[in-house]
Amino acid sequence: MARVHKVLNALDKDAINKLKPAARPYKANDGRGLFLLVSPDGSKQWRFKYTFAGKEKGLKVGDWPRMTPTAARDACDVYRQQLLEGDDPSALRKAGKVKATAEAALVERVDGIPVTFGEWAEAYCLSNETAEHGGRAAWGRKTASATRQIIRDHLFPTLRDKVMTEITSVDIAAQLRRVKSPTVRWFARMRASLIFQYAIAAEATNVEIDPAAALKTNPKLGDRSNGKNNKSLAQEDLPAFLVALDEHQDDGIAKPFTKLLMLTFVRTNELRQIKWRDVDFDGGLFATDSGPMLVIRKDIIKQTKAVKKGKAGDHLVPLAPQAVAILRALPQGKPGDYVFPSRRASKMKGHMGCVAHSIAWRLLGEMGYRDAMSGHGFRSLAKTILSEQHDGDGEEKFAERHLETQLSHVPPVIIGTYSRAKFIVHRERIMREWANLIDMYRARGHGKNVTKMKRAA
């Protein structure tokens, strides 16, 4: 015969909020076998204690405040009825004969209490992962994974267990201020807003406002870059930066990645996705009759209008001797391998992904330059310095259209070999000059003289 426990003191919201974490987990009894387990980390879990076939057993009911005391008691009433009928609630749950208690409690809520942010975030993600648009889900695998990570890491720490109607703009702002990266902060605020909009549209709760939307105009919380992501060094600060980069201790690929990013001034996302098949050390692979070359395939070029319309081709990047030396020093992989592979293997069997987009940003942070320089800042720095170069007659060394083409601001149209090698001779000169200028600034920082490196014959 099953036995249930006597009624004790019932818990309410105020009593639960007064329960503070201790060094060890402890119980707060609600009655008839239901109690709240308070963990040292502050989390609170509803559990049901009962005896079946002479053995004392326990069952998780749900988490506070996702599950209210009323919902927890209602769920336990179901378990007690199962016990009276001679069934073990734990065995029934494992056998799949009854719904999980938390799910059942959510379905049976009739007291008007809204669900939590964490529950609506999960519903929002599932709707985008399973909703079909022309036979496909709204989100791809990578988008779903990245979105869930942002929600989990940058919204859940303080918002997950709060009921939706109790969350204010102040609560969201406090959580967002914990996020260091302005870009990640922007994405987190956007996702919080979309979760609230999803709940409002569902009309399943009394959620009526989106508190995250009020933060959109806050320059520190609503701006994607906040003016910091594209920070670029002043020209006079470059020598000291180059010395710091040389002296920085790094046993990975972040340092060569950052140096190559500086020498090629391509976009961070483009460089991290290049594969060994995209590197031409001899200069003959792409029929340009020129020197060493790096190709940025059109499928990873920044999505400009020309790319979206299918009018943009591959972007060829001439490699100065200094850039070639960096690439040759890296472990050579197969043609389909990434030049800068991630240390973590992808979930796709037999496939190693590329490094994270934040690789240069993290290195700059370790050097103490996070607020002064960015990966994208190398592009504006190169453009500024190269635009100021003049020949002996006082004329500009490099035409604006050649610099813009090298920056891939003017994607070439696919009309044959010429388009792929557009202005290639001029751009080779630009890249060699830029690499030599970098050496000159580095030598200035070290207090030495420098000899220009020329293209090998």
Image: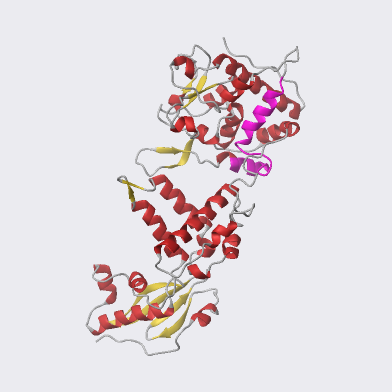
Based on the picture, tell me whether residue 379 belongs to the magenta stretch. Answer: yes
Quarter of the rendering occupied by the C terminus: top right
Name the side, left or right, on which 346 lies relative to 288: left
Camera-side residue of 219 and 232: 219
Task: Please provide percent x and percent y for residue 328.
Answer: 52, 24
* Residue at (60% x, 60% y) in the render: 173
Considering only vertical position in the picture, is 435 above or below 273? above
Q: Residue furthest top?
A: 457
Quarter of the rendering occupied by the N terminus: bottom left
Task: Please provide percent x and percent y for residue 371.
Answer: 67, 44
How many numbered discs? Answer: 0
* Residue at (50% x, 69% y) in the render: 165
Q: Is residue 209 visible?
A: yes
Q: Main secondary structure of the magenta part?
A: helix
Name the side, left or right, on which 56 lies relative to 172: left
* Residue at (49% x, 39% y) in the render: 355
Camera-side residue of 83 and 394: 394
* Residue at (67% x, 21% y) in the render: 436
Name the side, left or right, on which 377 lies relative to 288: right
When asked about the image quadrant of residue 104, the answer is bottom left
Name the side, left or right, on which 206 lies relative to 258: left
Magenta segment, which residues? 361-389
Q: Is residue 338 visible?
A: no
Task: Please provide percent x and percent y for residue 189.
Answer: 54, 55
Considering only vertical position in the picture, is 329 above or below 201? above
Considering only vertical position in the picture, is 223 above or below 114? above
Based on the picture, tell me whether residue 270 belongs to the magenta stretch. Answer: no
When asked about the image quadrant of residue 121, the answer is bottom left
Task: Please provide percent x and percent y for residue 336.
Answer: 40, 29
Camera-side residue of 147 and 274: 147
